[in-house]
């Protein structure tokens, strides 16, 4: 098999969170296609096993499955401890697991708030710290943190999502400078629309979005992110329209935002 990407020397094993679907699944497939062994982390063991069997059969790579809800306390440490016990040296960490809650802030439960804050902020930070420390000692490795184009926007309804994705972006860009001195790359990926079930868009709208370039396939996100990560890029906007979409969203006037809110059921007047 001819590799599409040039794999840096010594890079053999990748760990992907949220590996059971969408962008995470695409990362697993693309890395396995390159011949890398894969550690799949997610909540749905059945989906993880299915993906694991697929890449093992197609590419002959080793696969480990970790069924773990990363939004609960201690999750990051449990994932790290599993890898330590199994003597799995993680050369590439992909912090992809995410959660989108689109509701008026006052209607969210404490459980929902804690879940997204712990998943996006605490777990991402701790996995980066735990696995990143080992990479710094070896002076080799890569970390891919999945943020969002919405990290550069301020929009109602996805306030906590935007804010936590902004944390991931700023955190990743900041530690990039520290890690790269030790030959460890940190890349933050900020996609806008991706053709997955994550955004719960009807199939008709997803087809229109793909046609007009407003959405891209998870495979494209993974391919572009991997290629640029291995070139030690600090930040990746995978859709060529991302910069334009960010500019438009950042410059919406308040009357326009209030008009949009009136059209959405999440903000229906009580």
Image (spheres, rainbow, N blue to C red):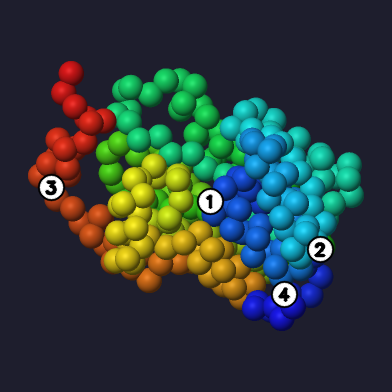
Q: Give the spatial CA distance, label 3 vs label 2.
A: 53 Å
| Helix, strand or loop at mark 1 | helix
Q: Earlier in the sequence, mark 2 or mark 1?
A: 1
What's the residue at 79%, 75% (across, down)? 9
Question: Residue under circle 1?
Answer: 22
Q: Earlier in the sequence, mark 1 or mark 3?
A: 1
Q: Quadrant of the N terminus?
A: bottom right
Q: Give the spatial CA distance, label 1 vs label 3.
A: 31 Å
User: In x, y percent, where is residue 53?
Assistant: 75, 51
Q: Earlier in the sequence, mark 3 or mark 2?
A: 2
Q: Give the spatial CA distance, label 3 vs label 4.
A: 46 Å
The quarter of the picture where residue 194 lies is: bottom left
Report the mark closest to the observer, 2 or 1. Answer: 2
| Helix, strand or loop at mark 2 | loop
Q: Give the spatial CA distance, label 1 vs label 4.
A: 23 Å
Question: Residue under circle 4?
Answer: 7
Characterize the local packing of mark 3: few (<14), some (14-19) or many (20 or more) Cα atoms within 10 angstroms.
few
Question: Residue under circle 3?
Answer: 256
Report the mark closest to the observer, 3 or 2. Answer: 2
User: In x, y percent, where is residue 55?
Assistant: 73, 58
Question: Residue under circle 2?
Answer: 60
Residue 142 at least partly seen: no
| Helix, strand or loop at mark 4 | loop
Residue 5 has which mark? none
Residue 224 at least partly seen: yes
The quarter of the picture where residue 155 lies is: top left
């Amino acid at each position: 098999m001819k590799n599409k990407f040039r794999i840096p020397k010594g890079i053999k094993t990748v760990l992907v969170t949220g590996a059971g679907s969408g962008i995470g699944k695409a990362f697993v497939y693309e890395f396995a296609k390159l011949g890398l062994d894969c550690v799949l982390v997610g909540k749905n063991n059945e989906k993880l096993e299915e993906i694991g069997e697929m890449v093992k059969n197609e590419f002959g790579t080793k696969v480990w499955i970790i069924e773990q809800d990363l939004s609960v306390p201690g999750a990051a440490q449990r994932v790290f401890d599993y890898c330590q016990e199994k003597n799995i040296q993680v050369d590439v960490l992909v912090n992809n697991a995410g959660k989108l809650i689109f509701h008026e802030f006052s209607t969210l439960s404490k459980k929902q708030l804690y879940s997204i804050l712990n998943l996006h902020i605490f777990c991402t930070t701790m996995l980066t710290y735990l696995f990143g420390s080992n990479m710094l000692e070896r002076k080799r490795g890569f970390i891919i943190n999945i943020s969002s184009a919405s990290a550069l926007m301020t929009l109602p309804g996805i306030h906590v999502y935007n804010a936590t994705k902004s944390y991931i972006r700023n955190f990743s860009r900041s530690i990039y400078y520290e890690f790269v001195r030790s030959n460890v790359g940190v890349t933050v990926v900020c996609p806008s629309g991706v053709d997955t079930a994550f955004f719960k868009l009807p199939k008709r709208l997803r087809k229109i979005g793909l046609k007009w370039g407003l959405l891209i396939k998870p495979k494209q996100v993974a391919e572009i992110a991997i290629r640029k990560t291995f070139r030690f890029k600090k930040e990746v906007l995978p859709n060529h329209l991302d910069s334009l979409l960010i500019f438009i969203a950042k410059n919406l006037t308040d009357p326009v935002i209030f008009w949009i809110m009136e059209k959405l059921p999440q903000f229906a007047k009580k």
